[in-house]
Image (cartoon, rainbow, N blue to C red):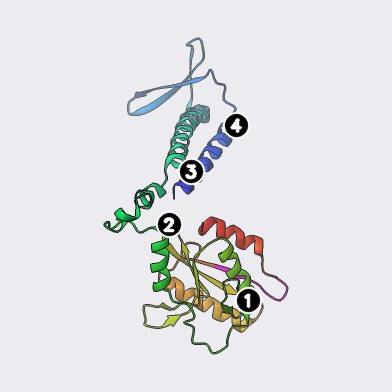
């Protein structure tokens, strides 16, 4: 993602600035070098042009000046790249593609097949492809969500209502087929509309129970074996007897991965 690239550039810039701050080399000292008999000889040159030969035992002096020059050049490049990328992010609007169709009159829309589905059309197709209520486990849901469906636990109701309030398309207990032909039933399948990508969410509500935790780890391994990567394609929440549901943490995940 472009926003992640921007954060990466920021982290490199911070690291470079720390390196510059730690380097106490004077700004008017320049590094010069020559090559003789296949070996490099280094010199320090002050503001008057006077050169000082650096002996091998003092090569760290040359290294500090070289590091300073590299860091200064890199800082300039990173600053420029970050500015260009942020300018692009500010101007880039993928919604303009959809708007070309949305802004047409109804008469024209009836004659056109859009290259890209509108968000509403895509969501409708996604909901059709991801049917909810597929878990054959016999226990029925007892908690009614804001959207009018029954889920099995109070925490799952909290999760479902959070997804709903953030307008995140979701289905409860869809069916996911593994490579070996077996099925698992994620607590939630969610759609990142902007990226048009399906993300699964598992809630582990009895983490303090040994047998339950073992089954939870087995389920995570099944996801991993199927190529579903935790933190990318799969998110999860946890609670235990002395560890209540962390709603703030869930909100952060929603904002980071789903909106």
The magenta segment: 236-243
Q: How packed is label 4: few (under 14 Cα within 10 Å), some, or many (20 or more)?
A: few
Closer to the chain start, of discs 4 and 2, is 4
Q: How packed is label 2: few (under 14 Cα within 10 Å), some, or many (20 or more)?
A: few
Closer to the chain start, of discs 2 and 3, is 3
Residue 50, percent from left and from top: 49, 11
CA gap between label 1 and label 2 equals: 29 Å
Which one is closest to the eye, mark 4 or mark 3? 3
Q: Residue at x 45, y 59 (%)?
A: 193
Closer to the chain start, of discs 4 and 1, is 4
Magenta-drawn stretch contains 107: no
4 and 2 marks in contact (CB < 8 Å): no
1 and 2 marks in contact (CB < 8 Å): no
- Helix, strand or loop at mark 3: helix
Front residue of 228 and 150: 150
CA gap between label 4 and label 2 equals: 40 Å
* Residue pointed to by mark 2: 195
Q: Is residue 215 above or below residue 242?
A: below
Q: Residue at x 35, y 24 (%)?
A: 35
CA gap between label 1 and label 3 equals: 36 Å
CA gap between label 4 and label 1 equals: 48 Å
Closer to the chain start, of discs 1 and 2, is 2
Q: In the drawing, what numbered circle is on residue 6?
A: 3
- Helix, strand or loop: magenta stretch: loop
Q: In the drawing, what numbered circle is on residue 21?
A: 4
């Amino acid at each position: 993602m472009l926003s992640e690239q921007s954060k990466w550039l920021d982290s490199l810039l911070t690291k470079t600035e720390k390196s510059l701050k730690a380097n106490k080399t004077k700004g008017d000292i320049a590094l010069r070098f020559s090559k003789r008999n296949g070996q490099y000889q280094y010199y320090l040159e002050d503001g008057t042009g006077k050169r000082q030969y650096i002996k091998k035992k003092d090569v760290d002096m040359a290294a500090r000046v070289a590091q300073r020059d590299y860091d200064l050049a890199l800082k300039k490049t990173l600053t420029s790249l970050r500015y260009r990328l942020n300018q692009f992010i500010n101007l880039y609007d993928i919604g303009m593609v959809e708007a070309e169709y949305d802004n047409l009159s109804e008469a024209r829309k009836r004659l056109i097949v859009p290259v890209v589905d509108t968000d509403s059309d895509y969501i409708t197709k996604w909901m059709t492809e991801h049917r909810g209520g597929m878990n054959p486990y016999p226990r029925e849901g007892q908690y009614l969500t804001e959207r009018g469906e029954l889920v099995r636990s109070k925490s799952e109701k909290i999760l479902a209502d959070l997804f709903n309030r953030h307008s995140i398309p979701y289905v409860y207990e869809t069916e996911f087929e593994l490579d070996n032909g077996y099925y698992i039933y994620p607590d939630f399948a969610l759609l990142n509309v902007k990226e048009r990508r399906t993300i699964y969410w598992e809630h582990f509500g009895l983490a303090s129970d040994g047998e339950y935790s073992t089954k939870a780890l087995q389920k995570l391994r099944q996801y991993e074996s199927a190529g579903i990567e935790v933190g990318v394609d799969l998110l999860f929440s946890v609670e235990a007897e002395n560890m209540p549901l962390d709603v703030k943490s869930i909100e952060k995940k929603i904002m980071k991965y789903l909106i």
